[in-house]
Image (tube, coloured by chain):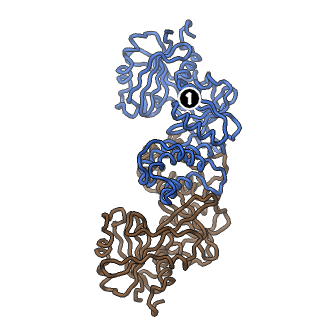
Chain colours: A brown, B blue
Amino acid sequence: MSDPVLIGIDWGSSSFRAFLVDARGAVLARIATRDGVLAVPPGGFDATLVRLLGAWFEAHPRLPVLASGMVGSRQGWHEVAYFLCPVSPRALAGALLPVLSSSGRIVNLVPGLCARDRRGLPDVLRGEEVQVIGALDEFPNARLLCLPGTHSKWVRIRAGIIESFTTFMTGELFAVLKDHSILGRLAVEAAEDEAAFSRGAEIGLAAEPERGGTLRRLFFARSLALADELAPEAVASFLSGLLVGCEIREATGIVGAEDEVVLVGEPELCRRWERVLVLAGRSCAIASSEAAARGQLRLARLAGLLGKGSA
Amino acid sequence: MSDPVLIGIDWGSSSFRAFLVDARGAVLARIATRDGVLAVPPGGFDATLVRLLGAWFEAHPRLPVLASGMVGSRQGWHEVAYFLCPVSPRALAGALLPVLSSSGRIVNLVPGLCARDRRGLPDVLRGEEVQVIGALDEFPNARLLCLPGTHSKWVRIRAGIIESFTTFMTGELFAVLKDHSILGRLAVEAAEDEAAFSRGAEIGLAAEPERGGTLRRLFFARSLALADELAPEAVASFLSGLLVGCEIREATGIVGAEDEVVLVGEPELCRRWERVLVLAGRSCAIASSEAAARGQLRLARLAGLLGKGSA
């Protein structure tokens, strides 16, 4: 077994994940808890970190520590300003914020990213930047990445530089509609219905403007059910496919349909998005699910944090 | 004061409203309670009706009774099948379902409407059909109506016939996002902010596909707040304007931008939509807020339910 060279932390709103990473980006050990940023009491980040990682700190006294995600937000440990795109991995590595923990360890916080569209409207991400950099390590020629999820991110790359990105509220919209809207009222919990997912995806994808946009198409989850053309057990799968289809249709309007889409994230989510991309006739690839650890390693290396032997 | 000729009932999911209507469609008296269809116990519609309207039934023993809305749905008193568009007011009047109440009164249930797009996908409404017919009584040359609300309806008219319609989940999406999503978490309750409403509306309206659709634009309510370019007190107003703007942009893709939009509904809602239509450069008019009573009167007259003296 290889030696670890980095302790990487992905500290998001609702979860805490840490990795022991070797020099090739492989994850040798991992810790995952529900101690997300929103669950940490004010002023409690240092103590939470020492409680969760104290054993690793003792066992690996010389390893550098990198932390990404909401831990660098205003609600986190220390705010790290968003870095404005376009940005290279090297420039981002130069903007890490070192924070001294009571354990004596320096924790290097990774900034989130901001992108502005032509009208100057901002978009933001925090935590996904390390996944993007990890995926670029694996797919150095990628021009378009998609990170599916609660707030899906589509990221444009040019010559290895993060040029811009766009957020879609796909996963969150699915959750609030299923749990709190009239669409959920007709739904009955059931196993995933692949046919209903694909049917929803095709309706979400269809490009003609005379079919309306997302605000209009959502209602098909209700009208089809009321017309007895969608079973209550299939409503959730249909809505899920519809929303992913809407995301891909909207994203295509922004970034075009030419580039291969590299999917980055949890394997199950990536496969779900892949199915809809294939329905849309798009070529795609799925990045390693360890993209976050790989990206943290690359940032640490670019920042000169790794010992000579491991860099 | 004129004499009533009809008892009209608008019995929706969450509210019960009844009107005493004169021969010109004016409302002489009204009752409004929270006894919506969802609040009535199974088998309890007849008893609820007699409890709420018993005094009117006694005072006006010969008046016909018409009821529209979810009372005619599967969850209501008796299911009345959706009538497939295109439909004339006269044809709809011929499809009323008479139901005998224990009070001895016949209650005529109005069918909802179904419309199919070119691909055969259904859309449905129930209750709005009487508002549409009432507005057409006031605007006989209207070609396009908009009924703003929880589920906004855009209705195409040709020569006084309801040709088709489209639903947008605008109001419901606003409510679930404000109360249950991360967008609401940054919001602080405050009085309406007109500038933020207009700013959101302009972002929702902008037509370029490279700005993405509704699923993408929703996130501006968060990214602008995180970038300190939208105050927490303004987030809800911004989101409201954004969603109305998105509705009008999507509807324009379906029905075009030429026709005057006749707004039908609660005056405050209509004024809110009017502001965004004006921003979009559209001409519009607002129908009488008594469109429902007026439409019920017209249906009752076409159905031959009114006495000779009042017809």
Query: Circle 1 marks a residue in which chain?
Result: B
Q: Quadrant of residue A53?
A: bottom left
Question: Residue pushed farthest top?
Answer: B309
Q: Which residue is mark 1?
A: B129
Q: Residue at x 66, y 62 (%)?
A: A256
Q: From where the camera sits, is residue A229 visible?
A: no
Question: Quarter of the image holding residue A153?
Answer: bottom right
Total marks shown come to 1
Residue toward you, B29 or A187: B29
Percent coordinates x, y for residue B81 in the rendering:
52, 31
Name the amino acid, label 1.
Answer: Glu
B211 up-or-down from B155: above or below: below
In percent of width and height, residue B283 lies at 67, 35
Q: Is residue B114 left or right of residue A189?
A: right
User: Left or right: where does residue A189 sit relative to residue A202?
Assistant: left
Residue A166 lies, with reference to residue A111, above or below; the image says above
Residue B273 pos. (x, y %) = 57, 38
Figure quadrant of the C terminus of chain B: top right
Mark 1: give few (<14), some (14-19) or many (20+) Cα within 10 Å: many
Is B104 or A54 nearer to us in this picture?
A54
Where residue A75 appears, as percent x and y from the top left, is: 39, 63
Up-down relation of residue B211 to residue B136 (above or below): below
- Furthest-bottom residue in this view: A309
Give me the residue at 36% from left, 30% from top.
Answer: B40
Residue A105 at least partly seen? yes
